[in-house]
Structure formats: structure tokens, C-alpha cells
Amino acid sequence: MNVPVFIDIPVPHQTLELRTFLKSLGAEIAEENAESGLCTDLKNIIEASKLCWNLNNDADVEMVFNGIISLLLLVPAAEAESVVTLFCEKVGKVPDGDKRAALRLRMLSTLFYGLEAGTSLRYVVLCSLVRLAGHHDLLSMVPVDLDQIKNWITQWSISPAKTQVLYRTLHDSLIACNMRELATKVMIELLGTYTEDNASQAREDAHKCIVTCLADPNTFLMDHLLSLKPVKFLEGELIHDLLTIFVSGKLNQYQQFYKNNKDFITSLGASHEENLRKMRLLTFMQMCENRKEMDFSLIQEEMQLEKDQVEEFVIDVLKTKAVRARIDQIQEKVIISSTTFRTFNKHHWQVIRQHLSDWLQNLNTLDVNFQSVSLIQSQVQQQ
């Protein structure tokens, strides 16, 4: 990647020009280059670069920082981590009242894409990008595609600890920008990085994952969380009990839990009304598993609704596409076509296997019938 430079002259002259320019802005920086080399020069320049934000023209600010970036890209990867980290700290830290977050993101992006694709230095920059974008609701300017990030993690060969930091940073920024569905997926990836040996260290992450899933209005299937090692480590705690209710329990079980643990639900920052809404939907899904139709009166009783609320409730359920059905207003019943199973275990696989076996048998029978018809037609033609 070609990065615009402050001035196209030899490197030592560039650092001198940058020092002189920063000095003219009032920075406390030596006018001469450091004897220890480019890394020290860059650290001095980056420390003094905060005064560039006093410039009124964004193009002037960007020109100076592009000059710094062009020099950063010349530092050998083995020596560059401390300098790149310092650059990210200074550019990524936005003072109160600063309205140039988008400009800061552009400069961090320039550094990110200027670095070699396989260098782990990109990890440092990406963390800063995600953190800054999350704080200012600018995630649209940052790569947050989970598959792409997983590919980068593999490409950079970073440690599990760094992978966890990246996922955790991304999750927090997604939550801040109200992108809960993707945040849930990221948190599940994070928990998947732990093993039985260190699952106890993931208590906070596991707790946060459960809260995120419960709060996401579009997340209905949560049984896979119970198999995650860090979540298993929470067995016996209230948060695990609450998750179990959302996985396979019914509305009345949640209401009893809430009655006994109101302060706990409040401490999660969760909305009791939203929890009720989700539990009604989940309970309805479960009721649809073994029914072809359901009277309004049954729905009213099980969902604890007023009679005039039943139809609106069913419409809300159908909007989620978790259940496929139609409303018979005259008969006051719901005709069910299919539903999403809340849990998927060995029994469900066996049911699918039986359905596929029956389907195959029916196809074979159909094939035999077609062959018989074809034979009869052939015989008729010969006569």
C-alpha cells in the first residue's frame, strides 16, 4: 500500500522535518535525531504529535500523520510493536470535546492496511480501531465480519490470550452500537477459546455471554450455550439457572424465578417485560412442537394474556418466523405448519433420520411405479 508522506526525502531528513514542524507547534522535542535510530525518533515524534490536533485543517493533520505512518512501515516487524502500540494509543485516545473520531479511524485504517497482511502488528491496530469505533458508534468504518476476523487470527498466529482480548473488545463495541446479534456470535467464539483447564478464568465472559443472549430480542435458541465449558463452570449459580429456564423452561417457571430473585434480574440490567415477552414466545414455540392447531383459549391461559391480546401476540410470534402458522379468526384457533425446536438433541436427529428414510422409501416406490407404467406403455405400443 502506498501511503502519502509528509515530504518525499530520505528517512533521516523526514524525521528532522517532522521534529522541526512539531517544534514550531510548541512541542517539547529535540530538533536533532536520536542517536539510537528510527524507533526512538518515531517515539519522540509520536509523543509530540498531540499538538497536530490543534491544526484547523483536517487535511493538514492527516498529512502529518501519514508521514509518521510511512516511517512506521519502514521499521522491521521485530522492532515495531512498541512504536505501533504507542501510535495506536495516541491516535485512538480521543480527548473530551474532540470531534475527529472519524479522522482518527481513517489514520488507524491507513496503518492497518499498510502493514503486511500476515504480521501480528495488525492485531494491535485492529484492537484500537474496534475500541475507538465502538466508543463513537462508527463500526461501519471498521471490519467486523466475524469470518474475516477469524481468518486474520489464524493468519497472524496470535496467542489465545490475545485472541480473547480481541473478541472481548469487539463484543463490547458491538454491544455499545446495539449490534447484539453479532455480539452474541462473537461472545460464543470467545468462550470457545477456553479449555477445561482454564474455563474457571472465563467466569465473567460466560456471565456476559448469557446476559447478551437473553437481552437480544432476536436470539431464541440458546441450548448450545450449555455445552460451552465456561458456562458449565457456572452450574449451580443463579445465572445458569436463568439460562436453563430460557433454554427449556416455561413462562410460569420464569415468573417464579423472577418472584424469588427480583434483585438479581435487576442487577443484570435486564428488562423484566422483555424477558416476559421472550419467554411467552419460547413457551409458545414449545407448545407448537406437538400440535397441529391451538385454540385461542389455550393460548390465553398458557401465555397469561387478556382475550383481546391473543391475536396480536400470535402475529408478533409469526413475525419472528420461529413458527409458521395461520390464524383462523372465525374458529378462534391457530393452524400450525411448523415450529423451530428450542432444543435439538439425539431424539430430534432420530426423527429426522426416520423422515429421510421414509422419504427415500417413498421415492423408491415412486420409481418402481414409473417403471411399471413405462413397461405397460411399451407393451401397448407393441400390440
Image: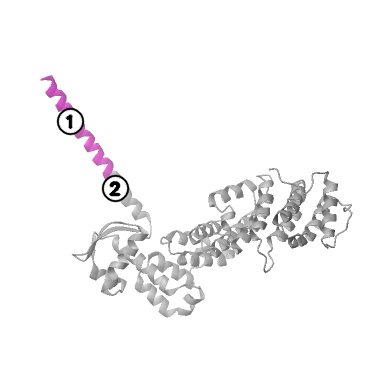
Q: CA distance from mark 2 to mark 1?
A: 26 Å
Image quarter in which the N terminus is found: top right
Evaluate whether residue 236 shows in this view. Answer: no
Residue 134 percent coordinates (x, y): 59, 62
Magenta extent: 358-383
Give whichever of 239, 156 is nearer the camera: 156
Write down the residue under mark 2: 355
Evaluate whether residue 170 shows in this view. Answer: yes
Q: Disc 1 residue type? A: Ser
- Note whether 111 is above or below 196 in the view shown: above
Residue 3 percent coordinates (x, y): 71, 46
Along the horizontal axis of the image, is 53 left or right of 198? right
Write down the residue under mark 1: 372
Q: Residue at x 38, y 59 (%)?
A: 343
- Note whether 33 is above or below 373 in the view shown: below
Give whichever of 233, 103 is nearer the camera: 103
Residue 34 percent coordinates (x, y): 87, 53
Along the horizontal axis of the image, is 240 left or right of 105? left
